[in-house]
Image (cartoon, rainbow, N blue to C red):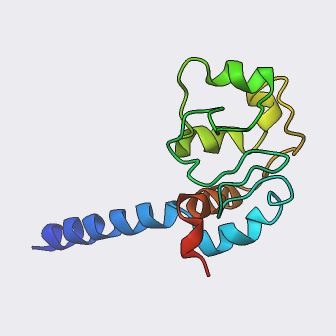
Amino acid sequence: MKIRCLILAASLAIPAGAALADGDAVAGAKVFKQCQACHSATDDKNKVGPTLMGVIDRPVATVEGFKYSKAMQEFGADGKVWSEELLEEYLPKPRDLVKGTTMTYAGLKKEDDIKNVIAYLKDPTAVK
């Protein structure tokens, strides 16, 4: 009986931990303020950088009307998609992952900030 209780307790704890790992969209909206000088997230208007509205699961370097650097075009040429995992790799040091990108931002240093921004980018209009 004790083993069943332990198994049940462990199985209930696993989904809760996974949900927490997804990030906090409200906190992500605050972190995104560092990005909004160059990117929008709640409309489809390009700025200095392309709009990030709908970026999750979008093919790299495909926003209509935005002129991407040659480096970013080459990075996306093999069909890469901005998945959460690719963004987790890109956001800490964009220029390390895409050599020659014109994005000048050095990157997000804190893992929580990265996860939170990704949570925000999933649905920026949900944050009031």
User: Is residue 115 left or right of 45 when viewed as pictured?
Assistant: left
User: Is residue 42 left or right of 96 when viewed as pictured?
Assistant: left
Up the image or down, 109 lies above or below 16; here it is above
Say which of 116 and 1 sits in front.
Answer: 116
Residue 123 position within the rendered picture, expressed as x and y whole percent measured from the top left = 53, 64
Say which of 84 and 41 sits in front.
Answer: 41
Residue 92 position within the rendered picture, expressed as x and y whole percent measured from the top left = 75, 44
The structure residue drawn at horizontal position 13% and vertical position 69%, both measured from the top left corner, is 4
The structure residue drawn at horizontal position 54% and vertical position 46%, both measured from the top left corner, is 84
Residue 58 position within the rendered picture, expressed as x and y whole percent measured from the top left = 53, 40
> Which quarter of the rendering shows the N terminus?
bottom left
The structure residue drawn at horizontal position 62% and vertical position 34%, both measured from the top left corner, is 62
Up the image or down, 126 lies above or below 114; here it is below
Among the 4 quarters of the image, the one containing residue 99: top right
Among the 4 quarters of the image, the one containing residue 61: top right
Among the 4 quarters of the image, the one containing residue 98: top right
Q: Residue furthest right?
A: 104
> Which quarter of the rendering shows the C terminus?
bottom right
Residue 45 position within the rendered picture, expressed as x and y whole percent measured from the top left = 72, 54
Say which of 39 and 1 sits in front.
Answer: 39
Q: Residue furthest bottom?
A: 128
Q: Residue furthest front?
A: 65
Q: How many marks?
A: 0
The structure residue drawn at horizontal position 20% and vertical position 69%, both measured from the top left corner, is 8
